[in-house]
Image (spheres, rainbow, N blue to C red):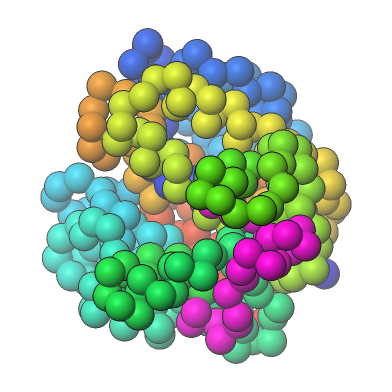
Amino acid sequence: MTKVLMIFIDGFGLGARRDDNPYFFARTPFFDQLLGGHILYADSQVVQGDRAVMIPTDACLGVPGIPQSATGQTTLWTGINAAQAVGRHINAYPTPKLREIIKSFSIMKVLAERGKKVTFANAYRPEYFDLVEKRKAHHSTSTWVAMSSGRALRNIEDLKLSNAVYQDFTNRMLIDWGYEVPELTPEQAGQNLAQLAKEHDFTLYEFFLSDKIGHARDMARAINVYQQLDRMIASCVEHLNLNDTTVMVVSDHGNLEDIERKGHTLNPVPTIIINDHYQASPYEGIASLTDVTPYVLNLLGK
């Protein structure tokens, strides 16, 4: 039976081959080996390796302006061009109109209704729900997508039992905030994520520190993010059977790849599909964020 693990990296675009791109300096041996070189650049075409393909993917969605998170992520996880539906790119949190699109077409809702076992791997702090209830915080697009499935969200207790992965997969942020949780290496976090993927038909994991660090224009931290992600994803893939599990690395817009810009970019984003038999799936149909959800729904079938 086919399973899909989708690893979402916020603000992960394909940048130029120059020294304002942290990826230019980062050491990413896993992806280099997987794709046949250090090739995650804007001038790359579709790149095929033995077990993976990288497809430059449009994030602009045919709408003027800079791509933003709320519309990009809604599009990514519904297959509906959210920017066109509302007439503009919307940043940060989904508006009522975007939430209606998610409630109707969310990939996790559709799959759950088909009887598939779906999960959002991320753990939530208890303070998060208190802040939302007091209207001091808002649900992210990914949270709305996860809730649309009717499945419970994971918490800190799940994290302690290795049944969840935090947004900072090392747990360093939680430890700094006073939580008694284990600090993990990227390899340990990848193994935990792989175990969740083995137990579900569709697993979604979100990493958004990449976007935050891109906005901060911090070159050293940006290089480290690429390298830590490479290690985490390498470990995750190592602990999965790529005959029956497809790992997808996706994003919503560019940012981290251009440290000279404080905001997002117009660059395409990489859609990376990792599977021993990826050639048998119609990945050629992926050109835009609108194509990711239909690809997954087709992959998992009815």
Query: What is the magenta range?
Result: 147-167
**Could you tell me which quadrant the C terminus lies in?**
bottom right
The location of residue 30, given as percent across then percent down, is 70, 28
Residue 152, position as x, y percentages in the image: 60, 80
Q: Is residue 196 visible?
A: no
Please tell me whether residue 154 belongs to the stretch shown in magenta: yes
In screen coordinates, is 106 left or right of 185? left
Instruction: Looking at this view, name the residue that lies furthest to the front.
Output: 178
> Which residue shows up at 44% across the image and 39% down it?
210
Residue visible at 15% across and 47% down in the picture = 65
Q: Is residue 227 above or below residue 140?
A: above
Asked if residue 155 lies left or right of residue 144, the reply is right
**Residue 207 as seen in the image, left or right of residue 91:** right
Whether residue 205 is visible to the viewer of this picture, yes or no, is: yes
Query: In the displayed structure, would residue 50 be above or below residue 68?
Result: above
Q: Main secondary structure of the magenta part?
A: loop
Q: Residue at x 26, y 39 (%)?
A: 264
- 125 relative to 107, above or below: above
Q: Quadrant of residue 197?
A: bottom right
